């Protein structure tokens, strides 16, 4: 019996664009392999059979599922799409963009490389910030609620200011909020691939984290 493959969109994407998970799931089933939707939060036991593979869009999910639960392996959606020759990439006509690499995959060079190859395939010119890939620094969001909101926002502004370009590719929904608060124009990689706009939606740090916690508790 073949090992099962699952797609877990993560709590943040399910809150951000819930309709996107079905678009991605359909693409995976048509172009990759038979894939089932998995909605259990990465902070809870996924209760999957050993040998299961979880395709993640969230860097935090990728790290937690791969490190906390025995017998479960992970791969990012970016690496999956990068491995296929069946994706219809939009053309951004040489748009210059910086990349903010998410903290949980700081040591995952496969993700860093896939993200940049996908941007290249979309005719995006990557202008790197000094602190990128394995040297990336937090967007600031992870410091909440360890620090007061005012200090968290200062860290968000500091990270945003380190980006050479106004447009910044992110692949974490919370990073959208942070870069927006910091004064940049965040572009989520999933939005770029599907030729959709990126909107900050709820970016009040306290309210956003309350939304996330409520979702985590339900899933």
Image: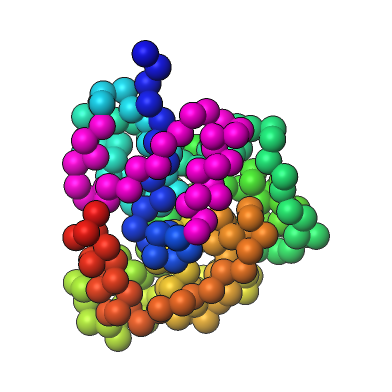
Residue farthest toward the right in the current orientation of the protein: 93
Pick the front one: 92 or 116: 92
Does the magenta run of residues contain 117? no
Counting the numbered discs, the total is 0
- Residue 192: x %, y % from top left: 63, 58
- Identify whether 30 is placed above or below 146: above
The image quadrant where one finds the C terminus is bottom left
In the figure, residue 8 lies in which quadrant?
Answer: top left
Residue 99 visible in the current orientation = no
Quick check: 132 left or right of 120? Answer: left
Residue at the image point whose x is 56% and y is 55% from the top:
190
Q: In which quarter of the image is residue 127?
A: bottom right
Q: Which residue is drawn at 36% across and 82% down?
A: 204
Q: Residue at left 59%, top 60%?
A: 191
Query: Residue 135, position in %: x, y?
Result: 43, 53
Q: Quadrant of the N terminus?
A: top left
**Relative to 60, 166 lies left or right:** right
- Residue 184, given in percent of the width and then of the height, sits at 55, 76
Query: Residue 217 versus residue 109: which sits nearer the camera?
Result: 217
The answer to whether one can see residue 126 in this image is yes
Please name whichever residue, 202 or 127, is drawn nearer the observer in this view of the structure: 202
Above or below, 35 against 8 in this view is above
- List x then y, in percent, for residue 86: 69, 35
- Taking the magenta stretch, the answer to whether it contains residue 24 is yes
Q: Is residue 29 left or right of residue 42?
A: right
Above or below, 101 against 46 in this view is: below
Q: What stretch is highlighted in magenta?
A: 19-48
Q: Which residue is drawn at 22% across and 59% down?
A: 218
């Amino acid at each position: 019996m073949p090992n099962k493959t699952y797609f877990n969109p993560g709590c943040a994407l399910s809150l951000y664009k819930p309709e996107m998970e079905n678009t991605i799931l359909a693409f995976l089933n048509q172009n990759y392999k038979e894939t089932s939707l998995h909605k259990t939060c990465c902070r809870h036991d996924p209760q999957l059979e050993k040998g299961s593979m979880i395709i993640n869009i969230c860097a935090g999910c990728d790290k937690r599922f791969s490190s906390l639960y025995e017998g479960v392996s992970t791969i990012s959606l970016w690496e999956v799409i990068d491995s296929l020759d069946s994706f219809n990439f939009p053309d951004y006509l040489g748009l210059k963009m910086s990349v903010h690499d998410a903290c949980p995959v700081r040591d995952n060079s496969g993700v860093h490389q896939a993200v940049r190859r996908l941007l290249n395939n979309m005719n995006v010119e990557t202008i790197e910030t000094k602190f990128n890939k394995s040297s990336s620094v937090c967007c600031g969001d992870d410091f909440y609620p360890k620090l007061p909101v005012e200090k968290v926002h200062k860290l968000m502004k500091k990270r945003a200011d380190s980006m050479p370009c106004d447009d910044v590719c992110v692949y974490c929904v919370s990073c959208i909020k942070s870069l927006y608060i910091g004064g940049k124009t965040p572009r989520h990689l999933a939005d770029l691939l599907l030729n959709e706009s990126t909107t900050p939606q709820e970016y009040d740090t306290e309210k956003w984290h309350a939304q996330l916690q409520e979702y985590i508790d339900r899933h």
